[in-house]
Image (cartoon, rainbow, N blue to C red):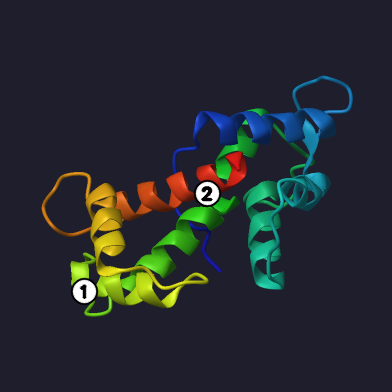
Amino acid sequence: MAAPKARALGPEEKDECMKIFDIFDRNAENIAPVSDTMDMLTKLGQTYTKRETEAIMKEARGPKGDKKNIGPEEWLTLCSKWVRQDDEEEILRAFKVFDANGDGVIDFDEFKFIMQKVGEEPLTDAEVEEAMKEADEDGNGVIDIPEFMDLIKKSKNALKES
């Protein structure tokens, strides 16, 4: 199994990865045992298939498979490839459900259909229209992926605050 492509880690992700690295850097020598790699990733809330685990360990051990330790830069590279962004993946899956015709945007009818089906009480047309206006940040009459992601993140934050 090939490793996923590396992606840029956000500051919070990088900090979280380094906190885990520091826990496994037992002697404060800026190294952690390669044998602890899976434990380190698990501490970040990740789970992997057997094939993924084998690929991660192969990458961590190096080309000859004899590397005993991993440094912080190597660790961050592993994190950038193997730490999944579950929230974004879930949001994209949800977007595809809303985007019934698959044109890459959610129009009013698609938004209305979903909004009237979810929740305890269906929304009125006026409520759907208001929600659509709020979500449609650029005012072009449709919700694209970035707008949808913002909408979901705002909703999650509002739920956390309540």
Image coordinates for residue 33, horizontal then vertical, percent? 82, 39
Residue ID for mark 2: 156
Q: Nearer the viewer, residue 116 or 146?
A: 116
Please, is residue 100 above or below residue 5 in the view? below
Residues at discs 2 and 1 in contact (Cβ within 8 Å): no
In the rendered view, does 151 fall on the left or right side of 47? Answer: left
Mark 2, secondary structure of its residue:
helix
* Res. 116 image quadrant: bottom left
Q: Residue at x 24, y 66 (%)?
A: 106
The numbered mark, 2 or 1, whose residue comes first in the sequence reads 1
Q: Residue at x 76, y 47 (%)?
A: 37
Please, is residue 156 above or below residue 116 in the view? above
Q: Is residue 30 visible?
A: yes
Q: Residue at x 43, y 53 (%)?
A: 152
Q: Residue furthest right?
A: 27
Q: Which mark is residue 152?
A: none
Q: Tell me the kind of residue under disc 1.
A: Asp
Q: Residues within 10 Å of mark 2 (few under 14, many from 20)?
A: few
* Res. 101 image quadrant: bottom left
Residue ID for mark 1: 109
